[in-house]
Protein backbone atom coordinates (compact mmCIF):
# COMPACT_ATOMS: atom_id res chain seq x y z
CA UNK A 1 0.00 0.00 0.00
CA UNK A 2 2.05 2.94 -1.29
CA UNK A 3 0.69 6.36 -0.27
CA UNK A 4 0.95 9.45 -2.45
CA UNK A 5 3.89 11.77 -1.84
CA UNK A 6 3.92 14.81 0.48
CA UNK A 7 1.04 13.75 2.72
CA UNK A 8 0.16 15.40 6.04
CA UNK A 9 2.16 13.75 8.83
CA UNK A 10 -0.84 12.03 10.44
CA UNK A 11 -1.98 10.53 7.14
CA UNK A 12 1.55 9.44 6.26
CA UNK A 13 1.84 7.78 9.68
CA UNK A 14 -1.50 6.03 9.19
CA UNK A 15 -0.31 4.59 5.88
CA UNK A 16 2.91 3.37 7.47
CA UNK A 17 1.00 1.60 10.25
CA UNK A 18 -0.76 -0.48 7.60
CA UNK A 19 2.45 -1.57 5.91
CA UNK A 20 3.66 -4.18 8.41
CA UNK A 21 3.01 -5.61 11.85
CA UNK A 22 -0.29 -5.30 13.72
CA UNK A 23 -1.68 -2.29 15.56
CA UNK A 24 -4.72 -1.58 17.74
CA UNK A 25 -7.07 1.20 16.67
CA UNK A 26 -9.21 1.98 19.77
CA UNK A 27 -12.45 3.91 19.45
CA UNK A 28 -13.12 6.97 21.63
CA UNK A 29 -16.57 8.51 21.60
CA UNK A 30 -15.79 12.04 22.86
CA UNK A 31 -12.91 14.46 23.35
CA UNK A 32 -11.99 13.20 26.81
CA UNK A 33 -11.72 9.56 25.79
CA UNK A 34 -9.68 10.53 22.71
CA UNK A 35 -7.20 12.46 24.85
CA UNK A 36 -6.93 9.59 27.32
CA UNK A 37 -6.29 6.98 24.62
CA UNK A 38 -3.58 9.14 23.08
CA UNK A 39 -1.89 9.49 26.49
CA UNK A 40 -1.89 5.68 26.84
CA UNK A 41 0.39 5.49 23.82
CA UNK A 42 -1.85 4.18 21.03
CA UNK A 43 -0.65 5.07 17.55
CA UNK A 44 -4.02 5.90 15.96
CA UNK A 45 -7.70 6.24 16.85
CA UNK A 46 -11.05 5.62 15.19
CA UNK A 47 -14.48 7.06 15.82
CA UNK A 48 -17.41 4.80 16.68
CA UNK A 49 -20.80 5.55 15.18
CA UNK A 50 -22.60 3.50 17.84
CA UNK A 51 -20.59 4.85 20.78
CA UNK A 52 -21.26 8.43 19.72
CA UNK A 53 -24.93 7.75 18.97
CA UNK A 54 -25.50 6.29 22.44
CA UNK A 55 -23.88 9.37 24.01
CA UNK A 56 -26.47 11.47 22.17
CA UNK A 57 -29.39 9.31 23.25
CA UNK A 58 -29.80 7.87 19.75
CA UNK A 59 -29.55 4.38 18.25
CA UNK A 60 -26.63 3.42 16.04
CA UNK A 61 -27.42 4.91 12.65
CA UNK A 62 -29.62 7.57 14.19
CA UNK A 63 -27.09 10.41 13.99
CA UNK A 64 -27.57 12.59 10.88
CA UNK A 65 -24.68 13.35 8.56
CA UNK A 66 -23.89 16.90 9.66
CA UNK A 67 -23.95 16.01 13.35
CA UNK A 68 -21.60 13.09 12.65
CA UNK A 69 -19.26 15.30 10.62
CA UNK A 70 -19.10 17.80 13.49
CA UNK A 71 -18.27 14.97 15.89
CA UNK A 72 -15.55 13.57 13.62
CA UNK A 73 -13.99 17.02 13.29
CA UNK A 74 -14.11 17.47 17.08
CA UNK A 75 -12.21 14.23 17.65
CA UNK A 76 -9.72 14.97 14.86
CA UNK A 77 -8.94 18.33 16.47
CA UNK A 78 -8.61 16.81 19.94
CA UNK A 79 -5.72 14.50 19.07
CA UNK A 80 -2.44 14.59 17.17
CA UNK A 81 -2.91 10.93 16.20
CA UNK A 82 -4.22 9.71 12.85
CA UNK A 83 -7.99 9.37 13.05
CA UNK A 84 -10.12 6.92 11.08
CA UNK A 85 -13.77 7.90 10.67
CA UNK A 86 -16.50 5.29 11.02
CA UNK A 87 -18.46 6.91 8.21
CA UNK A 88 -21.34 4.46 8.21
CA UNK A 89 -22.65 3.90 4.65
CA UNK A 90 -21.43 7.29 3.53
CA UNK A 91 -24.82 8.71 4.53
CA UNK A 92 -26.06 8.04 1.00
CA UNK A 93 -27.19 5.26 -1.31
CA UNK A 94 -26.10 6.54 -4.72
CA UNK A 95 -22.38 6.44 -5.51
CA UNK A 96 -22.23 10.09 -6.55
CA UNK A 97 -23.74 11.13 -3.21
CA UNK A 98 -21.29 8.90 -1.35
CA UNK A 99 -18.47 10.70 -3.16
CA UNK A 100 -19.83 14.11 -2.17
CA UNK A 101 -20.11 13.09 1.48
CA UNK A 102 -16.66 11.51 1.49
CA UNK A 103 -15.27 14.90 0.43
CA UNK A 104 -17.01 16.48 3.44
CA UNK A 105 -15.52 13.83 5.71
CA UNK A 106 -12.03 14.40 4.32
CA UNK A 107 -12.40 18.08 5.17
CA UNK A 108 -12.76 17.23 8.90
CA UNK A 109 -9.07 16.28 9.03
CA UNK A 110 -9.29 12.49 9.12
CA UNK A 111 -6.47 10.22 8.01
CA UNK A 112 -8.86 7.43 7.03
CA UNK A 113 -12.52 6.56 6.67
CA UNK A 114 -14.65 3.47 6.15
CA UNK A 115 -17.61 2.88 3.87
CA UNK A 116 -19.91 -0.05 4.63
CA UNK A 117 -22.37 -1.97 2.45
CA UNK A 118 -25.25 -2.08 4.95
CA UNK A 119 -28.19 -0.55 3.09
CA UNK A 120 -30.31 -0.05 6.24
CA UNK A 121 -33.13 -1.75 4.29
CA UNK A 122 -34.47 -4.78 6.24
CA UNK A 123 -35.76 -6.35 3.03
CA UNK A 124 -32.30 -6.23 1.42
CA UNK A 125 -29.81 -5.37 4.18
CA UNK A 126 -26.75 -5.36 1.90
CA UNK A 127 -26.52 -3.17 -1.17
CA UNK A 128 -26.60 -5.21 -4.38
CA UNK A 129 -23.01 -6.19 -5.11
CA UNK A 130 -22.59 -4.07 -8.25
CA UNK A 131 -23.92 -1.00 -6.42
CA UNK A 132 -21.70 -1.71 -3.40
CA UNK A 133 -18.63 -1.85 -5.63
CA UNK A 134 -19.56 1.40 -7.35
CA UNK A 135 -19.94 3.05 -3.95
CA UNK A 136 -16.35 2.06 -3.06
CA UNK A 137 -15.13 3.29 -6.44
CA UNK A 138 -16.87 6.61 -5.85
CA UNK A 139 -15.24 6.99 -2.44
CA UNK A 140 -11.86 6.13 -3.98
CA UNK A 141 -12.30 8.75 -6.70
CA UNK A 142 -13.24 11.41 -4.14
CA UNK A 143 -10.12 10.66 -2.11
CA UNK A 144 -7.88 10.63 -5.18
CA UNK A 145 -9.29 13.96 -6.34
CA UNK A 146 -8.59 15.46 -2.91
CA UNK A 147 -4.91 14.39 -3.11
CA UNK A 148 -4.99 13.86 0.67
CA UNK A 149 -4.08 10.17 0.65
CA UNK A 150 -6.85 9.37 3.15
CA UNK A 151 -6.92 5.60 3.79
CA UNK A 152 -10.14 4.00 2.47
CA UNK A 153 -11.53 0.98 4.30
CA UNK A 154 -14.15 -1.14 2.56
CA UNK A 155 -16.51 -2.90 4.95
CA UNK A 156 -18.71 -5.94 4.32
CA UNK A 157 -21.47 -6.15 6.91
CA UNK A 158 -22.52 -9.74 6.14
CA UNK A 159 -22.06 -10.95 9.72
CA UNK A 160 -23.71 -7.95 11.33
CA UNK A 161 -26.86 -8.17 9.19
CA UNK A 162 -27.20 -11.93 9.75
CA UNK A 163 -26.50 -13.00 6.17
CA UNK A 164 -27.12 -16.70 5.59
CA UNK A 165 -23.58 -17.30 4.29
CA UNK A 166 -21.45 -14.48 5.72
CA UNK A 167 -18.03 -15.94 4.95
CA UNK A 168 -18.66 -16.55 1.24
CA UNK A 169 -20.30 -13.14 0.89
CA UNK A 170 -17.48 -11.38 2.74
CA UNK A 171 -14.74 -13.11 0.75
CA UNK A 172 -16.45 -12.28 -2.54
CA UNK A 173 -17.23 -8.68 -1.70
CA UNK A 174 -14.00 -7.77 0.08
CA UNK A 175 -11.96 -9.03 -2.88
CA UNK A 176 -14.12 -6.85 -5.13
CA UNK A 177 -13.76 -3.84 -2.82
CA UNK A 178 -9.99 -4.28 -2.88
CA UNK A 179 -10.07 -4.27 -6.69
CA UNK A 180 -12.30 -1.16 -6.59
CA UNK A 181 -9.69 0.77 -4.61
CA UNK A 182 -10.18 0.07 -0.92
CA UNK A 183 -6.84 0.29 0.91
CA UNK A 184 -7.95 -1.81 3.89
CA UNK A 185 -10.66 -4.47 4.16
CA UNK A 186 -12.99 -5.13 7.08
CA UNK A 187 -15.78 -7.61 7.87
CA UNK A 188 -17.02 -6.76 11.38
CA UNK A 189 -18.48 -9.73 13.21
CA UNK A 190 -16.10 -12.45 12.04
CA UNK A 191 -14.72 -14.38 15.01
CA UNK A 192 -13.51 -17.78 13.82
CA UNK A 193 -9.71 -17.76 13.40
CA UNK A 194 -9.88 -19.93 10.28
CA UNK A 195 -12.36 -17.54 8.67
CA UNK A 196 -10.20 -14.56 9.61
CA UNK A 197 -7.20 -16.27 8.01
CA UNK A 198 -9.22 -16.88 4.82
CA UNK A 199 -10.13 -13.20 4.62
CA UNK A 200 -6.49 -12.18 5.06
CA UNK A 201 -5.39 -14.59 2.33
CA UNK A 202 -8.14 -13.54 -0.08
CA UNK A 203 -7.36 -9.82 -0.06
CA UNK A 204 -3.58 -10.06 0.37
CA UNK A 205 -1.41 -8.06 0.16
CA UNK A 206 -3.93 -5.46 1.29
CA UNK A 207 -4.33 -5.14 5.08
CA UNK A 208 -7.30 -6.45 7.04
CA UNK A 209 -9.04 -4.89 10.04
CA UNK A 210 -10.73 -7.16 12.59
CA UNK A 211 -13.27 -5.97 15.14
CA UNK A 212 -12.76 -7.33 18.65
CA UNK A 213 -15.77 -6.92 20.89
CA UNK A 214 -17.88 -8.97 23.30
CA UNK A 215 -18.48 -11.79 20.83
CA UNK A 216 -14.78 -12.51 20.21
CA UNK A 217 -13.04 -10.87 23.16
CA UNK A 218 -10.96 -14.00 23.75
CA UNK A 219 -8.81 -13.21 20.71
CA UNK A 220 -5.57 -11.43 21.62
CA UNK A 221 -3.40 -9.03 19.65
CA UNK A 222 -0.70 -11.67 19.24
CA UNK A 223 -3.19 -14.30 18.03
CA UNK A 224 -4.65 -11.92 15.45
CA UNK A 225 -1.18 -10.83 14.35
CA UNK A 226 -0.28 -14.49 13.81
CA UNK A 227 -3.33 -14.79 11.54
CA UNK A 228 -1.97 -11.93 9.43
CA UNK A 229 -4.34 -9.24 10.70
CA UNK A 230 -2.83 -5.79 10.34
CA UNK A 231 -5.33 -3.63 12.23
CA UNK A 232 -7.59 -4.29 15.25
CA UNK A 233 -10.46 -2.04 16.29
CA UNK A 234 -12.93 -2.35 19.16
CA UNK A 235 -15.89 -0.46 17.68
CA UNK A 236 -18.33 0.46 20.41
CA UNK A 237 -16.56 -1.92 22.82
CA UNK A 238 -15.03 0.74 25.07
CA UNK A 239 -18.23 2.80 25.05
CA UNK A 240 -20.22 -0.29 26.01
CA UNK A 241 -17.72 -1.06 28.78
CA UNK A 242 -18.37 2.42 30.18
CA UNK A 243 -22.12 1.98 29.77
CA UNK A 244 -21.89 -1.41 31.50
CA UNK A 245 -20.26 0.08 34.59
CA UNK A 246 -22.73 3.00 34.59
CA UNK A 247 -25.79 0.74 34.24
CA UNK A 248 -24.67 -1.64 36.98
CA UNK A 249 -23.91 1.17 39.43
CA UNK A 250 -27.12 3.08 38.67
CA UNK A 251 -29.27 -0.04 39.00
CA UNK A 252 -27.56 -0.89 42.27
CA UNK A 253 -28.38 2.55 43.69
CA UNK A 254 -31.96 2.38 42.44
CA UNK A 255 -32.70 -1.17 43.53
CA UNK A 256 -30.63 -1.52 46.71
CA UNK A 257 -29.92 2.00 47.91
CA UNK A 258 -26.24 1.14 48.13
CA UNK A 259 -23.22 2.78 46.51
CA UNK A 260 -20.54 0.10 46.71
CA UNK A 261 -20.15 -0.12 42.93
CA UNK A 262 -18.74 3.40 42.94
CA UNK A 263 -15.67 2.12 44.79
CA UNK A 264 -13.81 1.33 41.56
CA UNK A 265 -14.49 4.68 39.92
CA UNK A 266 -11.77 6.52 38.04
CA UNK A 267 -10.01 9.15 40.10
CA UNK A 268 -11.25 12.74 39.73
CA UNK A 269 -7.80 13.99 40.67
CA UNK A 270 -6.15 11.90 37.95
CA UNK A 271 -8.60 13.08 35.30
CA UNK A 272 -8.25 16.70 36.39
CA UNK A 273 -4.49 16.36 36.07
CA UNK A 274 -4.79 14.70 32.65
CA UNK A 275 -7.00 17.38 31.17
CA UNK A 276 -5.21 20.26 32.89
CA UNK A 277 -1.99 19.24 31.16
CA UNK A 278 -3.34 18.16 27.79
Image: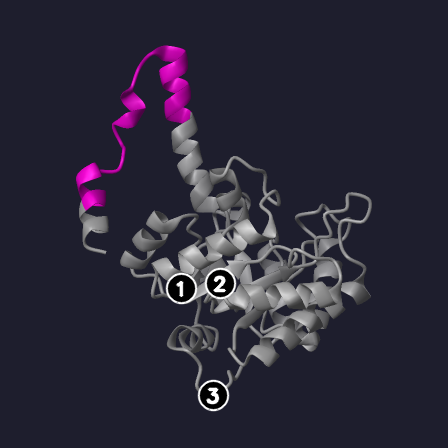
| Residue 251 shows up from this direction | yes
Q: Residue furthest bottom?
A: 5
Provide residue 240's location: percent of width, then percent of height. 46, 39
For residue 185, say whether it is visible: no
- From the viewer's side, name the closer residue of 26 and 84: 84
Sequence-wise first label, 1 or 2: 1
- Magenta stretch in the rendered image: 248-272
Residue at the extreme top of the image, as rendered: 256
Residue 50 placement (x, y as % from top left)? 54, 45
Circles 1 and 2 in contact, beta carbons < 8 Å = yes
Whether 72 is drawn above or below 58: the answer is below
Task: Locate residue 78, reporting x and y percent.
Answer: 35, 58
Q: Residue beneath label 2, please?
A: 84
Q: Which residue is mark 1?
A: 44
Residue 167 lies, in percent from the top left, at 71, 57
Disc 2 secondary structure class: strand
Q: Earlier in the sequence, mark 3 or mark 1?
A: 3
Identify the residue at horizontal 65%, vertical 66% (top origin). 100
Q: Nearer the viewer, mark 3 or mark 1?
A: 3
Say which of 107 and 181 sits in front: 107
Q: CA distance from mark 1 to mark 2?
A: 8 Å
Question: SS class of the residue under badge 3?
Answer: loop
- Name the residue beneath numbered marker 3: 5
Which residue does the image show at 42% across and 39% down from the upper left?
Answer: 241
Main SS category, magenta section: helix
Quadrant occupied by the C terminus: bottom left
Q: Is residue 79 magenta?
A: no
- For the point 59% across and 53% down, the residue is 65
Give the number of callouts. 3
Reply above or below: 209 against 32: below
Query: Looking at the image, which is closer to me, 11 or 228?
Result: 11
Amino acid sequence: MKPPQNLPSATSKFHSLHESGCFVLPNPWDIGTAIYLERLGFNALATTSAGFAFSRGKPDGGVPRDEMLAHIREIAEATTLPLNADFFNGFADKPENVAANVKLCIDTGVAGLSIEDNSQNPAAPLYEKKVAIERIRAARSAIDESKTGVVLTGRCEAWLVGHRDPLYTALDRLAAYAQAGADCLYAPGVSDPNEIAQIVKTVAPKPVNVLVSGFNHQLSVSQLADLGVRRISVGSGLALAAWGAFVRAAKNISANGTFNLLADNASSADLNELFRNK
